[in-house]
Each structure stands twice: as structure tokens, then as C-alpha cells.
Image: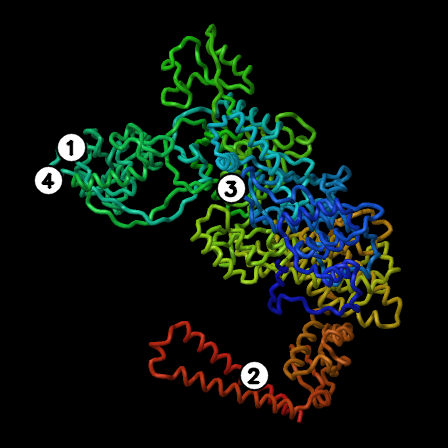
């Protein structure tokens, strides 16, 4: 049994300063129940799924007492304490009068594909989800505005509130677009994640950013619709189901297409909602009632309509072109599904025999990394400017082991004279660059491989060998024949499938294509005219570059899971097999294809095309590229091609937010297809977020062990459990060990529980870095502590409002009678924070938006205003108290609303505790009004005065530190001012200066007034000087003695270090980094001696 790991202690800068809070409240019933359970021996408990199942079963069978069950689940941090406790409690429980049953959410149970082994990576997660659901259904308490102040826990326990609040939001319909909102609709379609997927930090990034925009728009009275969905993920899903078949000893071909599709739909029904429920954990306020799946009936109709429509316009055709072929999957894959890795390889040098050549003209030296493709060569190319080989142009080479087949030697400027030998073999059938050359100069294309990667009959004696085996044997034969020159190690870029890692084979194949050139032109014009804007603007150049030099898009995939291509092959009755040709084979006749939304429509087309002939139709076995249906997503989700009310109201959408890595593969295709099929740009703006990397700037990779599951950050995870997430996947034993070492280095104590709000805020704060984000999880921990600081500050503030407090019915302004300068300053700062945050969000500058709202809460409310209000609240002036309470309430209410889009859970929980105006009708902060900037809260004069006061406070604190004053020592402060601005500021905020600087009192004196002797002095500028009375507060002689002792110790350290650095051979023998560290250490020690001497001089002046 394991206990929850304690959160790692963080640096003082990231910890929340202690807030003066009321006396700690007595323990809650839940806390007491947990203590009783632990005292009874139930403190070490299991989180295994079987144990959790027993919890549910025992709850049902024994009918546990509601309070005991709720308390156990509520207070158990990883559902580890609760599991055994509830089971044992159930065995002793007396049946209650009314049964209370805890039902863990079905979608939170451990997910496992049919026939697969238990996934140890998720069992701890399912355990924690059970806790959350149990809590949400059993212990959710009704919160009344302005009540329950004393019941606020000392710390914000996000596990106790997140799911309860999310359930409340969703059940009350707050995620749906408002019928009464008067603003311009804000619509955004979520980039549909793969139905097979699991959360990673990229998901967390786009969900957080989109949710911030959606919540902000909703609170600003805009009808807001955020449409969620998932992609059917053709290759990924098919692989999952095929693996489950393999576990049962079956194959896809063995069960047949119909049975395979049935099993895949069953898998989708059972596991397809997983990632959607995980996205809920991130606080996503999307309208789940409109959730779409790219194989839904409506979206499938849109795909059929798009294919037929584009074909009728001559934009879809079947033709021959080079594609990325995955031999194991036996399908073409998109460029996005191919990852290139630099791997150690071999560069082979050999003699290409020249027909009829003798002496130096007998052969051309050629280098290649793939000698097996020699069998498919159709030319050898040299650069016409290469004096060594230009005399060979026009001659012919003899292809080795080809029974004398000859190929031309051609001249082409493409050939790099400096690479290899300067002569290039051309294989148009198996290299994309060679294919382009072959098309340009009219070379034949020879395919030497079968679709499974083995050599075909064109390979002659090597037929049947795997391509890797062929490489080895052919090179050995070349060595035997004396035409091998040498081989040498060479780093080469290897294309590998994103799904499974197999080496991709460039292969010329007959596929369905979309003509892109005519579709690209209006998509380019949309950006050039400003109809579509891309943020950041630097990506416009990349967008234009891709669309300017665009190739036709291969949209067919040799899979069974997906949208089957609505193309039918016509076979005439009585026709010999060799006459009708074989669809997909070399004998295929392209004119035999007809297109139809359904078979009847295709039959009618065939009858028109081949009048009077009897025939049968055979539908194409292939399916469409997943990106084809995704390209329709911004309008298919609203019912296109039908003219639906949703399509009329919400399309085009306001924005597309996604990662810049799919700018072309998805974004550009959506623009092209949207403009061609609907006549409109599908969205007005594209915001491309940064890519998330680890703290060291490395790409997230399972083999490095640096892939971070957002739920691990939200809930926390021990190092042991983190290590277990790497097992049972695709990594081999060595890779697992290496990855676990990386995890141990980065997270030696595991990942502390941070909560959703802290993770969201940290991600958004990082967006200032630009293209890439180097995510340090420990920075998220800092924001978790800040959440607690915010919680405690507001908890203290709410208690100072009092249970009978009623907010002002009219909004406060800087001209409201009775407000103190501090209150006016607080309103001005709130107003400034609103402007900073809103303006930044308008231009997608989310980092500055978080900076604005963070600075208001941290530096203005917590550090200043709450401290300034304490003397007022401890005084006897009831009118001043009421004005201060009104200002405090205004800052709390406005500040929580301002923060809500970034941190939805803590703000909702706190806002529900705030008293409300009688006119306030919003039942939740997420449907309340967002703060707006107003001139009525601008007070530049009070801002200037507070700036002067804060400089005085800063200088005074520095004096206290220099003279080592203890916090309890309250010295008198004299502020000497010159000029009206400084004098007015010091007098206006004298009480606040005394409070924040820890002084007994503040006396403001004129420039000619005498300062009493015995003061420490700091001159801020020509208009302000501060004098801190130290006489009678400190003992100068004792302080000097301490400093002399410290200085002596420091001098000894300097002497020892200098002796080490002056030793013979120091510069030559000691590593450079050690010498640099020693030099820096010496500099700091010498500076310390100087500062100590200065401090002694200051104390001597007091004697």
C-alpha cells in the first residue's frame, strides 16, 4: 500500500506568504471520520481496480451509511485510504433507514481493449476518478451566496470540488449558447482528437486556451458555442482492433470486412468516450450535447456529398502518383503520419557499368544508401557542369543483375557535384525526388516491390526477399562481381510510420487524388485580402509557401475503418477477366469508375455512361484519408450540406485554435474545402499555439520518459506509478529502463498534486515563449501554492465582510463619497487589471493576460489592500469600515470574474461564497458578466501617490533589513518630502506606509525640518528621503560584534579559496567549469565582506 507523495517544497519565491487568517476552525465531520477510520487500523489501503470494484459492491450490498461513505471518499487523496476503509466499514455497518449507494462513473473505470492485458498505466487513474465521482454524487453541499463562511476549508482542496462544479455547470446547461445573449456569436470547433487517444500536454494546451476564450466570450454576453468532437482515426483505430484480433488468434482478413467493422464499432462504443471524459477533467466548457464523431451519420453524409461534389467539378480523380506506403499496414499514409529520424546507416559506393565503355570510361562511380533499389533504376544522372562526367552524357549504363537491361546517362542540374561521387542513380519508382526527375524528363517508372515490402518479379533473382534481405544479398553479390568499391558509415534520414514505427517505402501507386492548385488560389487570396488572419503573423509566410508550391492530395487509404470511397467499378456481364481489369491492380481501367452517393445513384451514372450494356458494380475497397472528413469539420458539425438553423447562425466560426504543426495538413485544407463547398472561409481567424516540450527543451517522447499526462499533474503521481506507465506499451526493455531513468531524474519524488486550475494557469503563462514551450512541472506546483494563497486571502476577506454584509447596489467609482485613498487606489488597480487582461486576450496575448490578473491579485489585493484595510477594520469608524468593505467586495467580485476563464474551479467555489447584489441573477460565475473597463474608476492622481508611497515602503523595508530589525520591532519613521506631489502622497498614505513597512508611526516633515539623531537614512530621490529611528530599537554594539564575527569567517573562506586558486598547475589541471565556479564564489565572498563593512559603519553612526 502506498501513501500519497508529499508535494515537493518549492523556493520561497513561489510559496505564498503567510496570510493573517482567523483561528483554525475545528475539524470537519469528514476529517473526524477519516481519523476514526485510521485509528481503527484502516490507514494503509489499496487503489487496485479490483478493490475499487469491491467498494462499489460492498456499498450496494451492505448499504453503507451515507456519512461514512462520503467522508471516506472525500478525504482520501488517491482513493487509497477510502478503499479498504469503506470495505471494512461495510462489513460492520448497520443498515440505514434510507440506502445511499455510491456509483462510480462507468466512463471512469479501467479501460481495456477486448482481449488485451490489464493496463497498469491507468489503474491508479481510475481509482482517483472513482473518488471524484463518489464525492460528486454523495457529498456535494448546497452553497448559498454569502453563507457558509466559517465552513471554508483552510486550503483549497481541488479534488473535493472540481467534478462537483463541472457536473453542476453541465447539468444546468451553462455550456450551451444562450438564447438571450445580445453580442456577436462566438463559435469555435474543437480540433477533434483521435478516438483512440489519451491526453497529453498538447491537448491540455488547446483545451485550456479554447476554454479561456469560450468562457470569456460567454461572460461578455456573446452566444457562445464550442463544439467538441472526436476523429475516427482510421489507422490508429484499425491497429487497436487488429491487435485485439491477434490476441484471439484471428486476423482482419480471416473475419472479413463486415465482421471487422462490427467489432470496431463495438470497440468505439465501449472505449470511444474516454478522451472526451478526460477533456472534461480539464474544465472544458464545450456543448457536449452537440458532440460529434467523424463517422456519425450526419458527418458521413457530408463526406459523401463533398466527394461527389468535388468529383463532379473535376477536382477528384484517380491516378498514379508516388505515395508514402506502409508495408506492414499495407496502406498509403499522409505526410503528417511520417516521422523522419536521423539513424546510423551505410553509404555504398559501386561501379555502374557503362555499355561499351573501356578504361576510365568503363563505369561510373555511384553512391547510394539503398542498393536494393538499383534493380528499379531507369537512369543515371550527372551534373552537366561536372568536368569529370559530362562526357558520359548520352551513353548508357547496364543495370547490374538485370539480364543486360540498359538505362541512359542524363545531365541534370539537380545533381549535387559534392555529394557522394557526383553521379546519381535515378529510381523513379522508389524515391520522391527521383520520381520528380523522372516525370520531368520522361523516364519510365519500375516498381520492384510488392505491397508487403518484399521484392516482386521485376527484381529478377531477388524476387520474394524482404527489402532488407535483398540489400544484404545484392551488396554481397556486387562484391563477388567486383563492382563494389567500398561502404562507409553514414547518418541518414529514415522515414518511419507514426503508427508502429515501420520504415515507409516511397511507392508509385494508383490512388484517388484531389486537385489542389485551383482550390489553393482562393485560400491564398483569403489571407492576402485579410478575409482570414493567422496569429502569429509569421506563420502566414509558411501558409502561403505551402499553398503556392502545392501537390495533389492523395485521399485514399487501404483500410477498412473509415468512410468508404463512393466509387464503383463497372464490370460487363460475359466479359473476360483480363478484359474488365482488376480494380486497384495494374490492369485496372480508369474509365470504368462511376461515382454515387449510394449504389443506385452510381448505377444510374453507369447506365448513362455505358448505355445498353449489362453490368455489375463493385465498390472500391479503400476508405478516405481521415483528414478529408476532418477538413469538413467546421461546417459538417452544423448539419451541412443541409441548410440548418445552426449552420445559418454559427457558421462561419469565429476562430480556429490549434497547433502550428498542422497548419497545412488540417488548417489549409479546411480553408480550401470550406471555400469550395460553402463559398465562405470557415473561420475568420486562426490562432496557432506553441508546441509543448519538456523542461530541457526536448520533444516529448515516450522513449525519453518525458511525456506528461495532464491528469498526472492534476492528481499527482508517485515515481513508482509514473514508471509503471511506461510498461506494457511499444517500448522495448532497454528503452523502458532509459525512460524510467529520465523520469527519476526529472521527478525524483513523483509529481505533486497540482489541480486543474494551477496547470491551466501555468500553461497559459508559458505562451510568451513563442513557438515552443519548455514546460517545468515544478512551476505548476508554484501556481498550486498561489491557489492556496488566493484561497486564504479571500477566506480572510470574506470573514471580514461579515455574515450580515450586503453589497452596494450601485457600482463603486472613484467619486463615490466616503472612499479612502486606499479604496480609490484599489478600484483604479482593478480597472487597470481589467483593461490589461481584456486587451491582451483580444490579441491572443494570453501570457500578458495572466500577468495582468495575477499582478492584481498578488501585488494589489493580497500584498497591499488587504493589509491596508486591517487598521480600518480594527478601528471604530463604522462609515470607514462600510466603505472599505464595499471596496473589498468589489475587488473580490470583479477579481474573481476576471480570473475565472483561467482558473474556473477555485473562482466558482469562492464566488459562490460571496454575498450578491439583490439585482444579481447569475447563478454561476461562468454566466455572470465579465468586468469591463470604465473611466469612472480611473484615478491617475491616486495611482501616482501610491507609487510614491510604495517607494517609501520599499526603502523602509530595505533599512530594516540592513539594520537587522526583527519583525516585532516597531520603529518610528520620518519621511522628509519636497514638493506637493510627494508631500501629498506621504500624508495621504501615512497610515498605510506604517502598516506595510512595520513602523510604529509615520511623521511627514518638510525639507527644512530637523531629523532627530539616531536614524538610519535612505534618500529615494530629490523629493523624498526616509529616516528610520533606530535609537532604542537596536543595540549597535551587539550588532557590530555579530558583523565582525561574520566578517572574520568570511575572510577565512576567502583566504582558503585564494590559496587553492594560487596552487601550481591550477589553470592547467582544474576543469574550466570548476575554475569558473571558484571565481564566482570568490567574487560573492568579497562582495559580502564589503556589505558587512558598510553595515558596521552604519551601526557605528548610532553609537
For the residues marked 4 and 3, what is the alpha-carbon distance in whole angstroms?
55 Å
Camera-nearest residue between 471 and 204: 471
**Alpha carbons under labels 4 and 1: distance apart:** 12 Å
Tell me the element at label 2: helix
Pointer 4 with pointer 1, Cβ within 8 A: no
Horizontal side of 375 relative to 1005 (left or right) equals left
Q: Earlier in the sequence, mark 4 or mark 3?
A: 4
> Looking at the image, is 780 positioned above or below residue 264?
below
Inter-mark Cα distance, 2 to 1: 87 Å
Determine which residue is flagged by label 4.
359
State the SS at label 1. Answer: loop
Residue 368 percent across, percent down from the top left = 27, 42
Which corner quadrant holds the C terminus? bottom right
For disc 3, the marked residue is: 663
Q: Is residue 826 left or right of residue 602?
A: right
Are there few (<14), some (14-19), or many (20+) residues within 10 Å of tag 4? few
Mark 4 or mark 3, whichever is nearer to me: 4
Residue at image position (73%, 77%) is 998
Q: What is the secondary structure assignment of the residue under circle 4?
A: helix
Which of the 4 quarters of the picture holds residue 1075?
bottom left
Q: Mark 2 sits on what residue?
A: 1091
Q: Which percent across, then down, holds residue 187? A: 66, 39
Q: Residues within 10 Å of mark 3 (few under 14, many from 20)?
A: many
User: Between tags 4 and 2, which lies in front?
Assistant: 4
From the image, tell me which residue sits under label 1.
Answer: 355
| Element under disc 3 | helix
Q: Earlier in the sequence, mark 2 or mark 3?
A: 3
Whole-angstrom CA distance, mark 4 to mark 2, is: 84 Å
Mark closest to the chain's N terminus, 3 or 1: 1
Q: Earlier in the sequence, mark 4 or mark 2?
A: 4
Quadrant hosting residue 1062: bottom left
Amino acid at each position: 500500500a502506498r501513501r500519497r507523495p508529499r508535494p515537493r517544497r518549492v523556493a520561497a519565491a513561489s510559496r505564498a506568504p503567510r496570510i493573517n487568517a482567523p483561528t483554525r476552525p475545528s475539524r470537519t465531520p469528514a476529517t473526524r471520520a477519516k481519523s476514526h477510520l485510521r485509528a481503527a487500523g484502516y490507514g494503509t489501503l489499496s487503489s487496485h481496480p479490483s478493490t475499487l470494484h469491491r467498494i462499489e459492491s460492498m456499498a450496494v450490498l451492505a448499504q453503507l451509511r451515507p456519512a461514512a461513505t462520503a467522508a471516506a471518499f472525500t478525504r482520501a487523496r488517491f482513493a487509497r485510504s477510502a478503499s479498504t476503509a469503506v470495505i471494512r466499514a461495510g462489513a460492520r455497518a448497520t443498515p440505514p433507514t434510507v440506502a445511499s449507494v455510491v456509483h462510480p462513473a462507468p466512463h471512469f473505470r479501467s479501460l481495456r481493449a477486448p482481449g488485451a492485458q490489464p493496463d497498469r498505466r491507468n489503474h491508479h487513474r481510475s481509482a482517483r476518478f472513482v473518488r471524484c465521482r463518489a464525492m460528486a454524487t454523495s457529498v456535494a453541499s448546497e452553497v448559498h451566496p454569502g453563507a457558509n463562511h466559517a465552513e471554508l476549508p483552510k486550503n483549497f482542496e481541488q479534488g473535493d470540488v472540481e467534478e462537483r462544479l463541472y457536473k453542476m455547470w453541465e447539468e444546468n446547461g451553462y455550456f450551451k449558447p444562450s438564447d438571450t445573449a445580445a453580442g456577436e456569436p462566438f463559435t469555435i470547433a474543437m480540433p477533434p482528437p483521435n478516438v483512440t487517444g489519451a491526453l497529453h500536454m498538447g491537448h491540455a494546451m488547446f483545451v485550456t486556451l479554447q476554454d479561456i476564450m469560450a468562457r470569456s466570450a460567454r461572460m461578455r454576453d456573446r452566444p457562445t458555442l464550442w463544439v467538441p468532437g472526436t476523429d475516427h482515426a482510421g489507422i490508429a483505430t484499425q491497429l487497436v482492433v487488429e491487435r485485439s484480433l491477434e490476441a484471439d488468434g484471428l486476423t482482419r482478413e480471416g473475419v472479413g470486412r463486415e465482421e471487422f467493422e462490427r467489432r470496431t464499432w463495438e470497440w468505439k462504443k465501449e472505449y470511444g468516450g474516454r478522451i472526451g471524459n478526460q477533456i472534461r477533467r480539464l474544465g472544458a466548457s464545450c456543448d457536449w450535447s452537440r458532440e460529434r464523431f467523424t463517422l456519425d451519420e450526419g458527418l458521413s453524409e457530408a463526406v459523401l456529398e463533398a466527394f461527389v461534389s468535388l468529383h463532379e467539378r473535376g477536382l477528384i480523380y484517380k491516378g498514379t502518383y508516388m505515395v508514402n506506403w506502409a508495408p506492414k499496414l499495407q496502406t498509403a499514409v499522409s505526410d503528417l503520419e511520417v516521422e523522419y529520424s536521423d539513424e546510423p546507416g551505410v553509404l555504398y559506393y559501386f561501379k555502374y557499368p557503362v555499355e561499351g565503355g573501356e578504361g576510365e570510361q568503363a563505369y561510373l562511380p555511384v553512391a547510394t544508401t539503398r542498393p536494393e533499389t538499383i534493380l528499379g533504376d531507369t537512369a543515371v544522372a550527372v551534373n552537366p557542369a561536372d568536368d569529370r562526367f559530362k562526357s558520359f552524357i548520352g551513353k548508357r549504363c547496364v543495370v547490374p543483375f538485370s539480364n543486360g537491361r540498359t538505362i541512359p546517362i542524363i545531365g541534370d542540374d539537380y545533381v549535387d557535384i559534392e555529394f557522394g561521387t557526383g553521379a546519381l542513380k535515378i529510381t523513379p519508382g522508389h524515391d520522391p525526388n527521383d520520381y520528380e526527375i523522372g516525370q520531368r524528363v520522361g523516364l519510365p517508372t519500375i516498381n520492384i516491390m510488392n505491397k508487403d515490402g518484399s521484392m516482386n518479379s521485376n527484381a529478377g533473382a531477388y524476387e520474394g526477399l524482404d527489402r532488407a534481405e535483398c540489400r544484404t544479398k545484392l551488396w554481397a553479390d556486387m562484391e563477388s562481381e567486383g563492382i563494389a568499391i567500398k561502404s562507409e558509415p553514414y547518418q541518414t534520414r529514415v522515414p518511419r510510420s507514426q503508427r508502429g514505427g515501420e520504415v515507409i517505402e516511397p511507392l508509385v501507386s494508383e490512388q484517388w487524388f484531389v486537385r489542389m492548385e485551383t482550390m489553393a488560389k482562393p485560400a491564398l487570396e483569403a489571407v492576402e485580402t485579410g478575409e482570414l488572419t493567422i496569429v502569429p503573423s509569421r506563420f502566414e509566410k509558411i501558409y502561403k509557401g505551402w499553398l503556392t508550391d502545392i501537390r495533389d492530395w492523395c485521399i485514399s487509404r487501404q483500410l477498412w475503418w473509415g468512410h468508404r470511397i463512393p466509387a464503383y467499378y463497372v464490370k460487363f456481364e460475359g466479359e473476360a477477366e483480363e478484359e474488365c481489369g482488376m480494380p486497384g491492380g495494374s490492369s485496372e481501367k480508369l474509365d470504368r469508375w462511376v461515382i454515387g452517393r449510394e449504389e443506385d445513384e452510381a448505377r444510374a451514372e453507369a447506365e448513362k455512361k455505358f448505355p445498353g450494356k449489362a453490368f455489375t458494380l463493385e465498390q472500391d475497397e479503400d476508405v478516405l484519408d481521415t483528414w478529408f472528413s476532418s477538413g469538413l469539420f467546421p461546417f459538417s458539425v452544423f448539419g451541412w450540406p443541409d441548410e440548418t438553423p445552426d449552420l445559418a447562425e454559427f457558421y462561419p466560426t469565429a476562430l480556429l485554435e490549434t497547433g502550428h504543426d498542422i497548419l497545412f495538413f488540417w488548417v489549409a485544407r479546411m480553408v480550401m474545402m470550406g471555400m469550395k463547398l460553402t463559398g465562405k472561409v470557415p473561420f475568420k481567424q486562426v490562432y496557432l499555439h506553441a508546441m509543448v516540450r519538456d523542461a530541457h527543451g526536448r520533444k516529448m517522447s515516450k522513449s525519453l520518459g518525458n511525456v506528461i499526462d495532464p491528469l498526472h499533474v492534476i492528481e499527482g503521481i508517485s515515481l513508482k506509478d509514473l514508471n509503471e506507465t511506461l510498461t506494457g506499451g511499444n517500448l522495448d526493455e532497454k528503452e523502458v529502463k532509459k525512460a524510467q531513468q529520465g523520469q527519476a531524474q526529472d521527478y525524483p519524488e513523483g509529481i505533486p498534486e497540482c489541480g486543474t486550475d494551477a496547470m491551466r494557469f501555468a500553461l497559459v503563462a508559458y505562451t510568451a515563449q513563442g513557438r515552443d514551450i519548455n514546460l517545468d512541472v515544478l512551476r505548476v506546483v508554484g501556481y498550486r501554492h498561489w491557489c492556496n494563497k488566493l484561497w486564504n486571502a479571500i477566506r480572510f476577506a470574506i470573514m471580514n465582510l461579515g455574515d450580515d454584509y450586503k453589497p452596494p447596489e450601485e457600482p463603486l467609482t472613484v467619486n463615490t463619497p466616503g472612499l479612502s485613498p486606499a479604496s480609490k487606489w484599489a478600484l483604479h488597480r482593478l480597472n487597470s487589471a481589467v483593461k490589461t487582461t481584456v486587451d491582451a486576450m483580444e490579441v491572443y496575448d494570453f501570457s500578458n493576460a495572466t500577468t495582468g490578473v495575477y499582478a492584481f491579485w498578488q501585488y494589489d489585493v493580497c500584498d497591499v489592500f488587504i493589509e491596508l484595510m486591517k487598521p480600518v477594520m480594527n478601528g471604530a469608524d463604522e462609515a470607514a469600515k462600510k466603505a472599505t468593505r464595499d471596496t473589498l467586495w468589489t475587488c473580490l467580485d470583479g477579481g474573481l470574474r476576471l480570473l475565472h476563464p483561467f482558473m474556473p474551479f477555485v473562482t466558482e467555489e469562492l464566488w459562490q461564497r460571496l454575498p450578491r447584489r439583490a439585482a444579481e441573477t447569475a447563478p454561476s460565475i461562468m454566466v455572470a458578466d465579465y468586468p469591463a473597463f470604465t473611466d469612472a474608476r480611473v484615478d491617475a492622481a491616486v495611482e501616482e501617490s501610491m507609487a510614491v508611497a510604495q517607494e517609501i515602503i520599499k526603502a523602509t523595508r530595505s533599512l530594516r533589513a540592513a539594520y537587522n530589525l526583527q519583525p516585532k520591532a516597531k520603529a518610528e519613521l520620518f519621511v522628509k518630502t519636497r514638493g506637493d506631489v510627494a508631500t501629498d502622497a506621504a500624508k495621504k498614505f501615512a497610515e498605510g506606509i506604517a502598516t506595510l513597512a512595520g513602523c510604529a508611526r509615520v511623521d511627514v516633515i518638510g525639507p527644512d525640518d530637523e531629523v532627530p539623531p539616531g536614524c538610519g537614512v535612505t534618500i529615494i530621490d530629490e523629493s523624498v528621503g526616509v529616516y528610520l529611528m533606530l535609537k532604542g530599537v537596536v543595540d549597535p554594539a551587539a550588532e557590530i560584534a555579530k558583523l565582525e564575527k561574520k566578517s572574520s569567517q568570511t575572510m577565512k573562506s576567502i583566504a582558503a579559496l585564494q590559496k587553492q586558486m594560487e596552487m601550481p598547475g591550477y589553470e592547467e589541471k582544474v576543469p574550466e567549469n570548476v575554475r569558473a565556479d571558484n571565481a564566482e564564489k570568490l567574487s560573492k565572498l568579497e562582495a559580502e565582506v564589503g556589505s558587512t563593512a558598510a553595515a558596521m559603519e552604519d551601526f557605528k553612526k548610532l553609537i
